[in-house]
Amino acid sequence: MTKEGVSKYKIRIQTMKQIIISFLVLLSSANGWAQNYVVKQQKAIVDDYIALMNFARYEAFSFDVSSLIDSTRVFEIIFREFERDSMVTEQSFFSTENRKMLSVFDETDQKKIHDEGSAFDEAKGIYKVAQKLIVGFLPIENDSTERVFLNIENMARGAYCLHLKPAVNTKTGETLLEYNCVPYKITEFEFNKFIPLVMYGSFWYDEEYDFFRFCGEQEIDPNEGASMQKYMPHYYIVGMVVR
């Protein structure tokens, strides 16, 4: 092949490369224009409901009490009310044992439970047992009350009504009815002594910065208490005694 022929051949090859590249670019663009962007419905998962309920001011705190399943104990739920840092009331809500034994049933019922396989641990004679305790707060219903839901798994449950008091702006007299809840960090406890579980406290007016606030620990050490308690005009501590 002559030099002229080689030159023409290279030009044709280069031209074909440019055509192919141009075609690929156009094809890619066409695919981009043809792509459909859609929003598809999908099934809501548990985390979606939790986020929604938290936004609506539902709060739930779960406490593991499974370390007590090998002995029968009595759980007594107690509400303590405070104004500033002084306790003004203490109410016992309900008491229940943490487990129910097969021995409380007659032979006919025990046989039925055995056939159904519904006992928690038949070998140990345990029909059902509480392994967790749940404290749940519902949104404030009106301008004076709040409901707290207590559930001792498999054993007892109930709703308790808290009476609320608004925080007051000491300069203008403006009031705010807003509460928040903070759990206690329970690492160990003693029988027959009050165990704090959750504090439910009001916002307070900060005179220095001229606004209502609620700030402090995200989890409270039961031995030290919460630093914010001295500022709160009103709060409750939900707790229990194990006997």
Image (tube, helix red, strand yellow):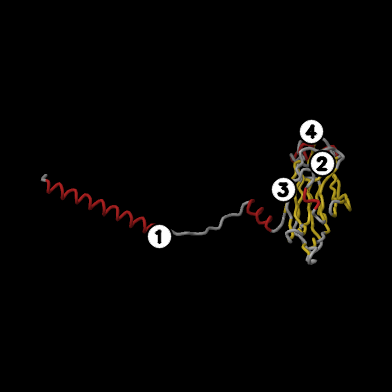
Q: Height in image: 72 above or below 17?
A: above
Residue at the spot of label 1? 34
What is the CA distance from the residue labelled 3 to the residue labelled 4? Answer: 39 Å
Q: Nearer the viewer, residue 28 or 205?
A: 205
Kindly identify which numbered label has been placed on residue 98.
2
Q: Residue furthest front?
A: 208
Which of the two marks, 3 or 4, is nearer to us in this view? 3
Give the mark nearest the N terminus, 1 or 3.
1
Give the mark nearest the N terminus, 3 or 4.
4
Going by the numbered disc 2, the residue's amino acid type is Asn
Which of the two marks, 3 or 2, is nearer to us in this view? 3
Query: Is disc 3 in contact with disc 4, using a CB cutoff of under 8 Å?
Result: no
Q: Nearer the viewer, residue 41 or 33?
A: 33
Q: Height in image: 186 above or below 165?
A: above
Kindly identify which numbered label has been placed on residue 218.
3
Going by the numbered disc 4, the residue's amino acid type is Lys
Quarter of the image containing the N terminus? top left
Q: Residue furthest left?
A: 2
Kindly identify which numbered label has been placed on residue 124.
4
Q: Nearer the viewer, residue 231 or 166?
A: 231
- Describe residue 18's horizontal placement relative to residue 182 as left or right: left
What is the CA distance from the residue labelled 1 to the residue labelled 2? Answer: 63 Å
- Image position, residue 235 (x, y; %): 81, 54
